Amino acid sequence: MSIGIDDGASLVFKRIPVEDLMDLIDRTSVSMGDGTGMDEIRKGIEEKRIGPEGADMIIDICMTRKKASSKFPGLRSPFFTSEGLRWATPQFAADHCADRLERDLVMDLTCGQGGQVLSLARTCDRVIAFDIDPLNCLLTRMNAISLDIDNVEILNMDSLSDKALSRAEKGCAVFSDPARPPGAVERSMDELLPDPRKIEDRYRSKVEGFCFEVPPYLSLDKVPFDCEAEYVSIDGRINRLNLYLGDLKKDDRSAVILPEGDRIAGSPMGRLQEIEDRGDLRFMNEVDPSLVKAGLIELLITDLDGKIERMDMDKRRTMLLSTAPISSPFIKESFKILGRSKDLSGVKRLLEDVEARSVTLRFPVEPSEYWNVRNGLEKDLSGTIKTQLFKGEDHILTSKVEKRRHSR
Ligand SMILES: C[S@@+](CC[C@H](N)C(=O)[O-])C[C@H]1O[C@@H](n2cnc3c(N)ncnc32)[C@H](O)[C@@H]1O
C-alpha cells in the first residue's frame, strides 16, 4: 500500500511536492550546520515560494534534528517541529508498545508527527493513522517516507468522525496518545483530546483491543475501563502509562523498564508486615518508579530472599531496606547505610567519623540552597569517601554500592 494523504497536508507548504520539501529541509539543515548565515538560509527557502511562516517551520525542524535523533535513534533525518517532538512517543516506548499491538491492522487515532506510527509499521501489516492537524500529518508522512515505509495510510481527520470510524475493520486494534495540556501534575481524563472514553464508546463494536497512552500522573481512580495499567520507565524515570483494553489486556497492573524491557505484572497486594528488629538492615535500595506507581513493590519483595522492608522517603523515592544489596533490574541503585542523624550538625559529625570527602544531597532542597547546604557539610572534610545523603524521617548517610550485573 502506498502512503496516502488527504487534501492539502499543510496550507503553508501545499504547493510543493513532499519529496522536494524533504530535500529542501535536508539541504537547509546542512547549510545551518556549515555556518551559512540566517539571512541567506531564509532567502534560499523563500526562493521556493515559501513564506516567512513556512521558513520559520523549516528552520525549527532543522534545529530540532539533533534532539529528534536522540529520541528516535532509528531515524537518520527526522522531521519533527520542536513542539511535535515534545509530544512524540520516544522510540523505546513506541517499539515496546508496537510489539504488544502486533496484528493485521492497527489504527493510530492521534498520530502526531509519527513517533508511534513508525514502530507500528514494523510490527503490523497495515497502519491507518489519523491526526486532526494537517501539518502533523505531513511530518508523519515525511518520517515514513524517510524510512521507506509503505504500509501506512495517513489521513488528516478527526478520529471521532463517522468517516474515521468507517475505516475500522473487525479485529483491528486502536492506539491513541491523546493531546493534553502541558504542565498539569494531577491530570484527569476530561483534559485529554480526544477523550479516551469517547473513543472507546465509538469504536467498541468494531475493535478488539485498545491501547491508550495517558499521562503517568493520571490517578487510576479516574480510569473507568476494565484494563491493564502499564507504567513504563525509561532510564529510571517514569515516562508513561499505557492502558490496555479488550484482547490487549494481560494483567491488572504491570511495570516495564526500558530500554531493557524487564516486566513485572500482577495485582497489587496488601503491604507486607513491618519488621521489628531493623538493626541488620544496613542497605538501602532505590526502587524503579514504574514498580512504585504500579503498586507492585510487594510482588518484588515476596520474590526476594532475606529480611526486606519498604521505606517511602518522599514523593519521588521509595527504598527497600535489606541485609545485603538487592540485585534486580527494578532496583536503580543500592547504598550502604553509614549512619543516621536527626539534624545536619549530626550529619557533619558522621561525615567526619566515616572519613568522607564529599556528600551529594539526594533529597528535595531548594536549588538556590543546594550548594550552601552542601558546602557547609563538606567544609574541612579531609577523608576519601564519597557519600550520599538521603532524608526520610531522619537524615541517612550512605555510600553507593557498585551495581552488580543482575541475573534475569
Ligand atoms: C500527544 S500527540 C500524539 C503524538 C504521537 N504519539 C507521536 O508519537 O508523535 C496528540 C495528537 O492528537 C491530535 N488530536 C487531538 N484531537 C484529535 C482528534 N479529535 N482527532 C485526531 N487527532 C487529534 C493532536 O493534533 C496531536 O497531534
Image (cartoon, rainbow, N blue to C red):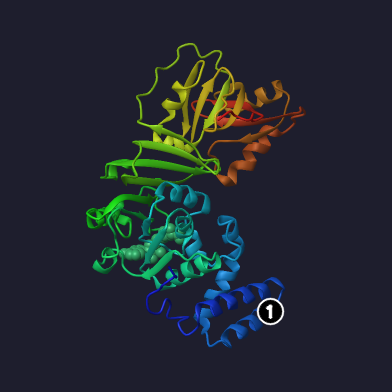
The picture places residue 144, in percent across and down from the top left corner, at 50, 66
Disc 1 is placed on an element classified as loop
* Residue labelled with disc 1: 37
Q: Is residue 159 left or right of residue 309?
A: left
Is residue 88 visible in the rendered structure shown here? no
User: Measured along the vertical axis of the image, is residue 188 above or below residue 85?
Assistant: above
Q: Nearer the viewer, residue 1 or 57?
A: 1
What residue occupies the far top of the structure in this picture? 277
User: Measured along the vertical axis of the image, is residue 85 above or below residue 295?
Assistant: below
The picture places residue 342, in percent across and down from the top left corner, at 54, 24
Q: Is residue 319 left or right of residue 62?
A: left
User: Which residue is pictured at 47% across the width and 69% down the height?
Assistant: 141
User: Which residue is pictured at 31% across the width and 44% down the height?
Assistant: 247
Is residue 353 visible in the rendered structure shown here? yes
The picture places residue 330, in percent across and down from the top left corner, at 52, 33
The picture places residue 291, in percent across and down from the top left corner, at 45, 35
Quadrant (top left, top right, bottom left, bottom right) of the N terminus: bottom left
The quarter of the picture where residue 370 lies is top right
Q: Is residue 199 left or right of residue 330?
A: left
User: Which residue is pictured at 56% across the width and 56% down the height?
Assistant: 71
Amino acid type at mark 1:
Gly
Quadrant (top left, top right, bottom left, bottom right) of the C terminus: top right
User: Which residue is pictured at 50% across the width and 64% down the height?
Assistant: 149
Q: Is residue 227 left or right of residue 201?
A: right
Write down which quadrant ligand 1 falls in: bottom left
